[in-house]
Amino acid sequence: VQAAVAVPWCIIWLYSVSFLLSQVPDSSVPKGYFASYVEAFGIESTCGFGEMGDDCAGRPGACTSTWPKGGVWKDPMCQVVADNDVRCWRCSPPRFILDARAFVSFFVFLWNNAFNTALGQ
């Protein structure tokens, strides 16, 4: 009986938390247009994991300055501002977001699993 309750509970929780992780707020990335790819994405570090130094420092762009990073895409409908300054690069939101709701959901998952285990003993 305990396994008959625990397995569906785990499946339902996985579906629920995957929905929570995919709910990325609109405010997670800037909404504006950027003049260049470097301005939007930044400069990747050329150094490997564990390498340090001033020559290893990359520079995050407007779209990649937070974790998890969003993406950059080129909008075919560019925005033209004063003095023929064409801005075509925009930010796409990240695929997931870890926020308080995901951690609360994980706590509820562990709490209900412990309760199910206690009932089965």
Image: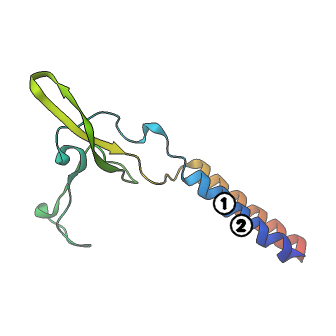
What residue is rendered at 54% in x and 52% in y? 22
Which quadrant of the structure image shows residue 91? top left
Please, is residue 61 above or below residue 34 in the view? below
Please, is residue 53 above or below residue 103 in the view? below
Q: Residue furthest front?
A: 76
Q: Where does the N terminus fall, quadrant-wise?
A: bottom right
| Element carrying mark 2 | helix
Q: Where does the C terminus fall, quadrant-wise?
A: bottom right
Left or right placement of residue 101 versus residue 117 in this view: left
Left or right placement of residue 96 versus residue 92 in this view: right
Left or right placement of residue 58 versus residue 75 in this view: left
- The residue wearing badge 2 is 11
Which quadrant of the structure image shows residue 82? top left
- The residue wearing badge 1 is 15
What is the x, y in percent for residue 69?
Answer: 36, 53
What is the x, y in percent for residue 44?
Answer: 21, 59
Q: CA distance from mark 1 to mark 2?
A: 6 Å
Q: Nearer the viewer, residue 52 or 72?
A: 72
Please, is residue 118 above or below residue 101 in the view? below
Amino acid carrying label 2: it is: Ile
Amino acid carrying label 1: it is: Tyr
Q: Nearer the viewer, residue 10 or 35?
A: 35
Mark 2, other Cα within 10 Å: few <14 / some 14–19 / many ≥20: few
What residue is rendered at 85% in x and 74% in y? 4
| Element carrying mark 1 | helix
What is the x, y in percent for residue 92?
Answer: 37, 46
What residue is rendered at 83% in x and 77% in y? 3
Answer whether labels 1 and 2 touch (C-beta < 8 Å): yes
Mark 1, other Cα within 10 Å: few <14 / some 14–19 / many ≥20: few
Count how many numbered circles sit on residues in the image: 2
